[in-house]
Image (cartoon, rainbow, N blue to C red):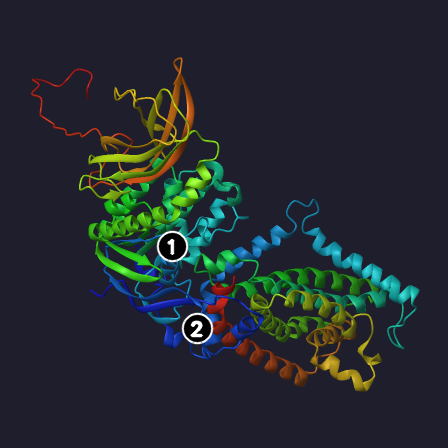
Amino acid sequence: MEPLIQLNKVGKFYPSRLTAGRLLRCLWPAPMKPKPNDFWALRDVSFELKRGTVLGVIGRNGMGKSTLLQLIAGLLDPSEGQVTVRGTVAALLELGAGFNPEFTGRENIFLSGSIYGYTQEMMAEKYEDVVRFADIGNHLDQPVKTYSSGMFARLAFAVAINVDPDLLLVDEILSVGDMEFQSKCFRKIETLREAGMSILFVSHGLDSVNTLCDEALLLSHGRMLEYGKTKEVIDSYMNMLAVKSQKSHAAQRPDDDAEKTVGARAEICDVMVINSKGVETIHPYTGEHCRVQYRLLFHDDVAHPVITLQTRTMLGVIASDITSEDCHRVLPPAKRGEEFLVSFEMDMNLCPGTYRFGVGVVDTLEGQHVPLFGREALTIEVISEQNARGIVYLNHSMSVKPVHTTQSVPGHE
Amino acid sequence: MKANEKQMRCYHRDAAVSQRIIEWAGLSVMMRSWCRHRELIRALTKRELLQRYRGSMLGLCWSVMNPLVLLLIYTVVFSTIMKSQWNDNMSGFGIFAIMMYCGLIAYNFFCEMLSSSSRLILDKPNYVRRVAFPLEILPVVMIANGLIHAMIATGILLAGILLVVGHIPWTAVLLPLVWVPFIVNCLAISFILATISTFVRDVQHVVGILLVALFFLTPVFYSSEKVPPYLRWILFVNPVAYVTENTRKVCVYGLVPDWKSWLLFMGVSVVLLYVATCWFQVIRKRFPDVI
């Protein structure tokens, strides 16, 4: 079977500066030639996507992910190369894409339907499904501009998957829905995928890419760095990030010091997570034995220092709060100018997701904690091959055994 | 599932091909798209119509009130204060008002068309960047909207003629025919203006000035007979003048329009529309770069 999408040496440039001359030039039909300092959002990208495959596109911000999706959705024309798509594309590119804010939800369903090439009658057949999936109650008769972003996403997603696209383009949109809706979407995506729909998925959540995608594509500065099996691509992306963060650490330290020393009696810097292989990472695996370490500097004499490490979810829920007292370590009084290397050893028993480490140091005066320094230090993203949702990973297993009962249980039908 | 009924949106975009200088099939591609999206056009037109007067108490009545109030002012100023006569045979407050109203309908339609064309694409960044929206239906929606207002106004005009003159000549049924080339012309101008204004935003301001000039260059409050021969060419190139003149002919004088000039106007308009759509199809690919 022919591949669903084919990209051949695709490139797209944007004029770097829109001078009056350039704008007027746009009106002349002859092809626009790139100038040397024009910005190539995407260049030399070639790949094929088979039907029924889920492809994750990863890369940092501004690396061409959205441009790639827009090209495939047919919103943009390539400046060079060829894009071929053999089928219908439903795009969930940005919130409210294609919705007219003044129209009600109901009207927007039909409007988007006709944009996807459905007649009024065909859309009427699907209408019930869309409404049931979106599940936004009587907001359906309100103009969409009054919707919350979550409701928006619900409706957009409900429409997009009910028009039977051959390819669904998803750009981060699921992250605004609540947990229940997200899992509903993932279930639906799974069914559609079995029915042969392909999905192109752009996300910064490496974890969802890891669980959802068969293949992944890594973009950097508009070029395709890697394309292949999800795990391999994610690994090389993580390496890239690690190298990057080391570099930026080295570059930023002097600034950081200058900024944070003012007024503070102590200071913490160089917070990092070392994984079980002894490599610095911000993407530890669930259950992996890791070390969180940082440098602690005292700018003043502190009699009873206590150091703390907090792990919070993105919503601010404290997943764990450890202090040196909890670890039964009493620190000696610290002198001005002394420096320590602090390490916490731990098992990352966290479910996949994004977490923040907050580090701090307090002084204990008559049983009261006086904060000396504290900050949100590091954001990590725990990834896993396991399917686990929530915060804590319980290292679970389960078994089901048949129970032999003689007759039907009373009260059970 | 009725998948085969669905319009398959397969496409192949080749940079080398899509950068062709001219899309010769521009107009036919567009007409097919208009047919395919007729429901969308209807929905958008209805919506825009309702939206304009949403929240106002009199609603669609404003569409009637607006030109009537303007008409009253103009008529009072020109016929009563400035004492200008329509022509030698016709005079009077009523006849002046009717003659002016014939011109005002076309002028208002054109006015509306010019000013909304100069914002047509600019106002809808969502449709350009975020969804594969058929942009080519936007001018059609706008024209359809203007036509509805023009039709309401024409209804009032005919009622006025009946009131002042006493009867409506049979030639009034030719009025739609008079409008056909004008509509084609407006559609073409709308495509051109919408495209230019996307890149050159000054167009909006130019249009503002142009509209004032056009009011005086169109025989709205004077008869075209009063224009000296060496300035007649202005009326000749002005599409609003054509409609104004011929509306008066068929609705008031009971004359049949001059078919030769009708054919000429129609021919020019179709060619203009063809060129405009072919051009639009090429330039539209650059909209996302600047919006």
Q: Is residue A79 above or below residue B228?
A: above
Residue under circle 1?
A91
The residue marked by circle 2 belongs to what chain?
A
The residue tagged with tag 2: helix, strand or loop? loop
Res A34 label: 2
Indicate the position of residue A56 as horizontal and vertical percent values: 28, 52
Residue at left 31%, top 48%? Answer: A246
Q: Nearer the viewer, residue A302 or B106?
A: A302
Q: Is residue A277 above or below residue B30?
A: above
Q: Nearer the viewer, residue A106 or A283?
A: A283
Q: CA distance from mark 2 to mark 1?
A: 28 Å
Q: Is residue A68 left or right of residue B129?
A: left
Indicate the position of residue B153 as horizontal and vertical percent values: 71, 61
Q: Amino acid at mark 2?
A: Pro
Q: In this rendering, do the residues under marks 2 and 1 share a single chain?
A: yes
Res A76 label: none
Answer whether labels 2 and 1 touch (C-beta < 8 Å). Answer: no
Does residue A196 appear anywhere in the picture?
no
Q: Amino acid at mark 1?
A: Ala
Q: Is residue B138 above or below residue A359?
A: below
